[in-house]
Image (tube, coloured by chain):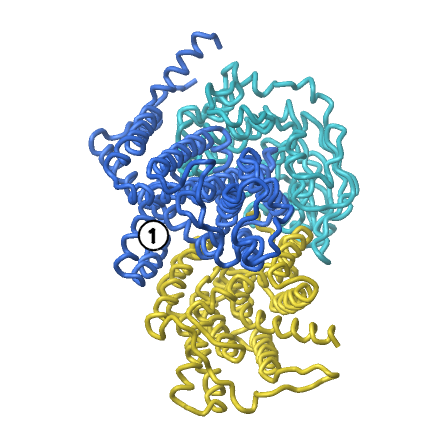
Amino acid sequence: MTTTHRTTDRLAALLRPGRSRALAGFALAAVVLFAVAPLLLSPFRLSLLAKFLCLAMVAVGIGLAWGRGGLLTLGQGVYFGLGAYLMAMHLKLADAGPGGVPDFMSLYGTGEVPWWWEPLRSPVATILLIALVPALLAGLLGWAVFTRRVRGAYFAILSQALAAAFAILLIGQQQTTGGTNGLNGFRAFFGYDLTDPVNQRMLYLVAAGALLAMVLVARQLMVSRFGELLVAVRDGEDRVRFLGYDPALVKTVAYVVAAVMAAVGGALFVPVVGIISPADVGVVPSIGFLVGVAIGGRATLLGPVLGSIAVSWAQTSISEQFPSGWIYFQGALFIGVVAFLPGGLASLVRRRRRRSAARSAPPAPVTQTEGSTP
Amino acid sequence: MTHVPTAETAAGAEPTGTAAEALLGTDSTRFRHDYLEVRGLRVAFGGFVAVRDVDLTVTQGDLRFLIGPNGAGKTTLIDAVTGLASATGSARFGGKELLGRGTHRIARDGVGRTFQTASVFEELTVLQNLDIAAGARRGPLTMLRRRGAVPEAVEQALELVGLTALRDTAAGVLAHGQKQWLEIGMLLVQDAHLLLLDEPVAGMTHAEREATGELLRRIGSQRVVVVVEHDMDFLRSFADSVTVMHQGQVLAEGTVAEVQNDPAVVEVYLGSPVSTEPPTTQAAGPLTTQEDA
Amino acid sequence: MDILNQLFAGLSLGSVLLLAALGLALTFGQMGVINMAHGEFMMAGAYTAFVVQGVVGSAGVSLLVALPLGFLVGGVLGLVLEATLIHRMYHRPLDTLLVTWGVALVLQQVARDVFGAPNVDVTAPEWLSGAVTVGGVALPKTRLFILAVAVVCVATLALVLQATPLGRRIRAVVQHRDLAEASGISSRGTDRLTFFIGSGMAGIAGVALTLLGSIGPTLGTSYIVDAFLVVVAGGIGQIKGTVIAATALGLMQSFFEYSTTASVAKVLVFVVIVAFLQVRPQGLVTVRTRSLV
């Protein structure tokens, strides 16, 4: 194949309807997130949106692992929590100053900083650990269970048990993790005063940027050969094995990516919301992450993001007015969407689009699309 | 499955394209002296011994058919060779021991198989199916990029199995026979040099069987091919040699004619002692009756 | 004596886990359905005991009335769930998990709206107050009673599965759904009955739990995860695995707790189970099948 040929291929690929629409959609999302929302929303609402964006980051990863990879992970709260707690620990240490002891430790504990807190004094180490710790845990656990072909419901249950164990562990370690109260009362984020509205807006922009970056990563993974292989593993794990691939590796990669995305979401959640506690990371919130993904369309790129933001928004507005209403609503969503619309709202959009396309131009018979009679 | 052979399917029967020749001939020198050698193979599920003391040698250019009544251990034998069922004894291909190794490693050493029920990735397109089959040796960077140009081998396989026109169709909507061909195409691009096919023409029309048989014959001249099949017409038309299994053991081996006149085979298939009425003609042979069973 | 103490604590916890997991093992084993609302059926059983006590008054009688009634309440809830939602989703087991989680959320909120969010207490009957002292260890009668209930439930279930026509039908459907159907067993009817019995077990477990402390709307959530772990570790298809796994988990938790703390013990148990699944990915007791996927 000649170079010119390849260039035209590239050009053609770039101009494919799918890709141009994606570019347009991405540009639109960027404008909305970076320009429209900060202009229109009050600082309070903007903070709220920032929180939703952090939760949506978890959803992007779940869409990849569950929607594309078939890994029903009921324990993303663990990775969200790891990112969040690592960040919170750093913020507590930073607030306490060099060599200082976080307030709650002197209150409940021995007044000494445990050794495993120490590395988090460094901002650089913190950022590295936020990515590395969840990646390592997910990699180890994923590799261990996937190579032994623990899958489907078994994997779901294990991931859920992990969430339960994690939350219980956090609650049990009152002196070093804040127990049920969790960690809160942060004053500054990498030196920026968290009470300053300007810094809050900056945080929002950071969250928006991170979410967009994750969507890009997820998109690249989905359209890549890896993405195709991931779907193949989901639909026929054994068949993939007979083609010479190790499905455990494919699944582990997807699981690790999802874990890191959740961790970053958690890490940004902490300065935005100002608190992280076991109630945000246990079994119930872990499954809660799935609602938005299921509603938006688990196997799509943007479905999980939009679904997650919509669900967070609904949760906030419904529980403001009817505290118990939200639970019924969430339960009804789970039942209704998963039982009757497994493709999520995205499948409705797709169906409509297909129908209108069919109306405007009846599809040519498949055999005629490319003449190839020998 | 009522599938009418189309212009494309005929391509499978008589591929004239040089591309197809190129695919079939890939690296044949590298594998010229390869053969499958099974010795003393035994597979047990709990207390039940599904395969025992099986010796089997299949060389390139010898299109081998594996037959036997249900439960004879044919599929289990394939399972053992491909790493799905754990077995004792020995199974060597290309100088390498296959037993005791992971399925995907065995596959990487050039052993490919199909299943009784066509198993393609239904939500992926024909092209994606083939591309995945061709890619087990791709590096991480290639994997993380979008597929640019279609790999040459995939292009050739599409042509060879007559699915070029359907390349962007989801594999799930293919007709039954087309799925089987897609699987064979996947084996070819996978660069498998030992092909284990489990009932590749089940559910196909006569014309499709003929096309598939021709294709297998061509593949068999370059690679080592073992076919499990119940269809006796198909066997008679295309088998170079036949191995008969019964109750987990090899009962007989030889050419079609030799096997058909083997008294032990006759007894197994007819359930009566051979001495009373040995079959004389092919039409009255034991293998004919099996077809209706 | 300490060891004896821990042993009893472990067995007691094991019996509670067993009660919670027994029904799950049945529904998961037969239908592959992960019923997340199982915990809420327990909760419903517990509130049944609460209501019965309000009506009957006498704690001694109400427990004995509540046990069968709790079975009925749990069973009917299960029946309704099966008939309305689960039966249309047998081919999507993972989705069933999410749907039943939605049901669980709704049931919890119903309980909150009906009985209030704060926990309520059910008085244990007079004849269960106090403890039996064995070898210097005081064994609370309530815990002994739960142990006995668990034993009776397992024995009854085993008897039903082994010796009654219903049990034979259930086992037939578990082992080979299509074949059972072909031999005239209505798998729909069997599914419903199994779900009824399995959910009823949850109701009994709920009634039993009222003896251990106060009950609230989220009672089920605290047991469901452990109960599922028991089922996973035990393997599906047979009660034996569930019994062993529940006992083992209870003992492990108790002994780990003794040497560390409750929360660390929880994590250790999880690690042990993951490690155990490395050795036996399908759990303790497995039913071998040839199915590919």
At x 50%, y 43%, the residue is: A95
The quadrant of the rendering that contains the C terminus of chain A is top left
- What residue type is disc 1 on? Val
Q: Colour of chain C?
A: yellow
Name the quadrant containing residue B34. Answer: top right
Q: Position of residue B261 (x, y in %)?
A: 70, 41
Given residues C187 and B101, the one toward you in this image is B101
Query: Tag 1's secondary structure?
Result: helix
- Whether residue A239 is visible to the viewer of this picture, yes or no, is no
A371 lies above or below A72: above
At x 65%, y 30%, the residue is: B108
Report whether B81 appears left or right of C149: right
- Whether residue C273 is visible to the viewer of this picture, yes or no, is yes
At x 29%, y 29%, the residue is: A31
Report whether B256 appears left or right of A91: right
Residue designated by label 1:
A337
Q: Position of residue A28 (x, y in %)?
A: 29, 29
Count every numbered label the image shows and give the total. Answer: 1
Chain blue in the figure, letter: A
At x 69%, y 86%, the residue is: C133
Name the quadrant containing residue B133. Answer: top right
Given residues C272 and C96, the one toward you in this image is C272
Q: Position of residue A144 (x, y in %)?
A: 63, 46
Given residues B203 and C25, the one toward you in this image is C25
Q: Position of residue C76 (x, y in %)?
A: 40, 74
Q: Colour of chain B?
A: cyan
Report whether C163 appears left or right of B100: left
Q: Chain of mark 1?
A: A
